[in-house]
Image: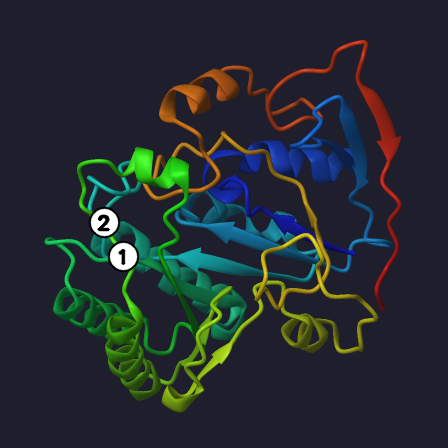
Amino acid sequence: MILSVSRRTDIPSFYLDWFLNRIQAGYLLVKNPINPKQVSRISLSRQVVDCLVFWTKNPVPMLPRLAELQAYPYYIQFTLTPYGREIEPGLPDKRTVLIPAFQTLARALGPHRVIWRYDPICLSPQYTIDDHIRAFSEMAALLDGSTSRVVISFLDLYQKTRRNTAGLELTSPDAGQIQILAAALSSVAHEHHMDMETCCESVDLSAYGIRRGACIDQALIEQLLGCRLHGKKDKNQRSGCGCMESIDIGAYHTCKNFCRYCYANFSPQRVLRETASYDPHSPLLCGSLSPEDCITDRAMHTLT
């Protein structure tokens, strides 16, 4: 089975101690986000875990501890955007901290195992199409040789996203703006030896050399493992998602990056409440168990 670490929160940035402790323990617990009384016990045995897929905006805590992950095949989805702290308030400086971290990871793991996510793309008076093209070009030049793939997506304005971005004047690009961005960004990506993919986008951008991607990427995982996988498409993701099945071990409302466009946090206040109970030695990422909780072993098997 593939473990997603995690779409719901930034485990490498904030909860790496917890995750590495759980590797030592051999299991962890995950509450069902719809019915938190249902708790799954997830095995971390290499007999059933085929690959880890990390998602992060700040992998700096991982850098001195990569050896502790060496028992597992894994790769990293690294989100790196041009936005300032008015939109991404919890992140360190990109030029002096995050871009060097990206380069360091690539040297340690290889560029095919560090995937650049330039997403979501949103527009505002401060972040125009020209601003995106200029920022993307600068980042791509710095990351040339450090990744072979860049993933783009466009802002989805869910109800809570509209609330959390109030006052920022953020909009999602319209159809014409998407075509302009796709043509320009794809050209820059190819100039810097990167393939470009979209994430969960219905628009066809193949005319610009942009294919529909998969974050839980069967082809890449098979390359890492050196064998075929026998998994299914993930039926729990949005329409247009190309990911194969995986188990997400994170928890919503626990990411302290506090990105204003985030779909996984309801509010900063909710995050502070949820994370107040964080214990790196607990089997749960955050929160506690109650007598009414029903813990069941998640059925898991290798996909090889």
What secondary structure is marked by label 2? loop
Looking at the rendered image, the quarter that the N terminus falls into is bottom right
Question: From where the camera sits, is residue 90 visible?
Answer: no
**Residue at (11, 53) in percent of width and height:** 126
According to the picture, the residue beneath numbered tag 2 turns out to be 170
Does 43 sit left or right of 187 as displayed? right
Q: Is residue 38 visible?
A: yes
User: Mark 1 highlights which residue?
Assistant: 122
- Please provide percent x and percent y for residue 16: 55, 38
- Name, please, the residue furthest toward the top: 291
- Vertical position of residue 235 compared to residue 135: above or below: above
> Image check: 278 left or right of 14?
right
Dot 2: within a 10 Å radius of its alpha carbon, few (fewer than 14), some, or many (20 or more) residues?
many
Cβ–Cβ under 8 Å for marks 1 and 2: yes
Near-viewer residue (124 or 137): 124
Q: Residues within 10 Å of mark 1 (few under 14, many from 20)?
A: many
Q: Which mark is residue 57?
A: none
Residue drawn at point x = 29 percent, y = 86 percent: 187
Residue at point 27%, 82% (across, down): 188
On the image, the x and y values in percent for residue 213 come to 54, 73
Instruction: Give the position of the C terminus as an image quadrant.
Output: bottom right
